[in-house]
Amino acid sequence: MRPLRWNIDAADGRARAGTIATRRSEIETPVFMPVGTQGAIKGVRFEWLEQEMDARIVLANTYHLFLRPGPETIRELGGLHRFNTWGRAILTDSGGFQVFSLNDLRRLTEEGVEFRSHLDGSKHFLSPEISMEIQAALGSDIVMVFDECPPGDAGHEATRTSLELTARWAARSRQCFDELQDSGSDTGRIENAPEGLDGRQALFGIIQGAGHFDLRSESLERTVAIGFDGYAIGGLSVGESKEVMYGVLDHIAHQMPADAPRYLMGVGTPEDMITAIGHGVDMFDCVIPTRNGRTGGAFTSRGKLNIRNAAYARDERPLDPDCTCSVCRRYSRAYIRHLYQAGEMNAATFISHHNLAFFIALMREARRAIIDGRYNEFAAAALAKLGDESASGV
Amino acid sequence: MRPLRWNIDAADGRARAGTIATRRSEIETPVFMPVGTQGAIKGVRFEWLEQEMDARIVLANTYHLFLRPGPETIRELGGLHRFNTWGRAILTDSGGFQVFSLNDLRRLTEEGVEFRSHLDGSKHFLSPEISMEIQAALGSDIVMVFDECPPGDAGHEATRTSLELTARWAARSRQCFDELQDSGSDTGRIENAPEGLDGRQALFGIIQGAGHFDLRSESLERTVAIGFDGYAIGGLSVGESKEVMYGVLDHIAHQMPADAPRYLMGVGTPEDMITAIGHGVDMFDCVIPTRNGRTGGAFTSRGKLNIRNAAYARDERPLDPDCTCSVCRRYSRAYIRHLYQAGEMNAATFISHHNLAFFIALMREARRAIIDGRYNEFAAAALAKLGDESASGV
């Protein structure tokens, strides 16, 4: 009896098509997880994610929910699933990344990290134990260990120091997590879990090491030694160059345990995901579909377009003529551009919706290509098409 | 052959339950028309209005679409229906009201009104003829005459002067409108219109007269003399007291032609609509469901609530426990309040959606009560419940 079951349905080179059975939903991989920072996907109702996109898992941010509405409120209201009504799987990050990226005034100790809220400057403290407690109150289905994320260009010495701390925090996360599971702190517990699953939260470890291959290997080894239900690559897409990111992926992804899901945190663009899948990554999350959507940026199979461009003022084509989402089946670039120019929030809603549908569909196409044994051809064709900016409609 | 057909399905006192057959949809009355100022309902996708609320008609604002994206663009793109994809009926106002309410620097002449755009200060001109031309380019199904709307507290002399101008503008609107219909300028023309309809735009006249009963009567008489497909009461809900509004309604509504729809422009609250229906009004429009929705204001069967109130932080009830809309069937006050406090646009989306559903459902209940011959009891009970603020959940 485990919290989740991982099955490889097909492999093609290093690329894998798998299924993650969680207590709440079965997730086919490769999978893109829409980000619901505050417990909602910005601008897109869950109904669309369920009925149209069939998203099986979303991400929520522990840091943001910790500050507002707070874990006590969510615990009292029965956990995040009951609070936000999303009945499928939820993965929560540990809060660490936001503490490090949103706070200049943090104070790091062996125990944890003290920081000031980006909302009101109030002082707060997070540690492996507190993060596990918050994630138990949220009742997410996949919990992430509390780690320290060094800058993308961190030197070898600083990265080693950080990595050591992350390893000790991973062990503390694991221990506290297990105690919380035993004590019934998890609000998301499922009594009648699917066959073979114990209804508990799953815990993923995180591999750090910045751009240093030897430290990435060491971090992997030490993380696997503790033992987790899945393994994530952290500390990429944090400002380092594409060469560094792709180098680390090439070096580490295929070495990660084959018998567990592999999650590349915070990534990324369609190009990055296609590349990472080729290295054996299974799971992704990123805010760009909704963040770019709010500023007029649409992802399409032929590259990005920005709807503010005057060239779209009388363009009757959908955002992406190859997309079958409900926005592309109905609304034109001209109309969405008008809404954007007029300051109507429906513009953000429409583009965010399309972008999420596009990311999710791209993962489905990748999966199909892996199962068919043609992933390399698929990746080459998709990357070429994504780079074909002349065809993006301008 | 006419542009629309009006049928009274039932009457109860002065209240009427009717059906307006337009070239694009059949509209059961009393009806609330959601306002899509820029060609979209703020925060609510048409899909919900069609599939869930079954709204048959929405309003669009000529002034706003005139300034952006402009009638030439919409004409080139095949008219407003094709541009925004709303396939049911659209009513457009004349643009006059916004010119008078959004512009301090307007210059009024017999010919029309010169004004500066509230967007960029650029100079523009609207007249009865130009308004008809724009509305023909939009291809709306119901066109409003170009009128002047005096302030709610305008004196007798000023109101009479304004009324005379409005009467001359109404005649010019009618003449230009007919010419535009004959010349095929209307982008919304339906070749195979429903039986008995000619597929052309319909034109409504507007009764002005501020709070002066004698001038309201005179305006009605002069408007009817010109002859329109429907008649609207303008110049209410523009800052006058409730007593003035209800007095004018009591005086004029039942005198309006029984054989045409009666439209109370820009109204209003649930209380105002219930009262006006009792005086024989059939059609309403107002921005408050979506405007209040964006600032956290929800309309419920037991009065208004503002979701920002801390009392809702752990309130698991829906916005309105008596509402069957998809927001109230799923989401709690606690969750929506959290989204509002967190600045998530989904809060505005959810509350706007509920408010529109509530307004539309209220009209359906009023219609049912009229058909059942119990409108007075319905109105008294609904008004008492709306005033029962102790029950609104705080």
Image (cartoon, coloured by chain):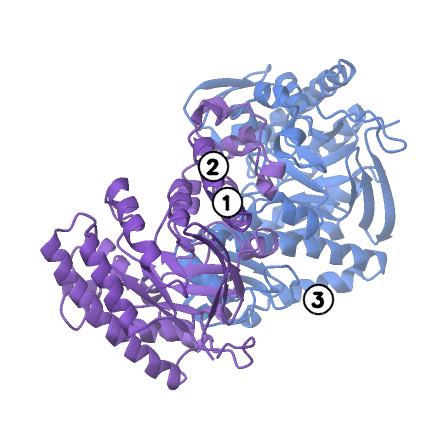
Chain colours: A purple, B blue
Mark 2 vs mark 1, CA separation in Å: 9 Å
In this rendered view, identify the residue nearer to me: A251 or B181: A251
- Image check: A100 left or right of B368? left
Other-residue count near label 1 (Cα within 10 Å), few / some / many at <14 / 14–19 / ≥20? many
Instruction: Output the chain of dot 2.
Output: A
Residue at (80% x, 58% y) in the render:
B368
Q: Which residue is mark 3?
A: B381
Badge 3 amino acid: Ala
Front: mark 2 or 1 = 2
Q: State if disc 1 and disc 3 touch (CB < 8 Å).
A: no
Other-residue count near label 3 (Cα within 10 Å), few / some / many at <14 / 14–19 / ≥20? few
Q: Secondary structure at mark 2?
A: helix
Badge 2 amino acid: Ala
Q: State if disc 1 and disc 2 touch (CB < 8 Å).
A: yes
Asked whether residue B358 is in view, the answer is yes
Whether callout 3 and callout 1 share a subunit is answered no
- Image check: B51 left or right of A309? right
Which mark identifies residue A362?
Answer: 1
- Residue A119 in percent (x, y) is at 28, 58
Q: Which residue is mark 2?
A: A382
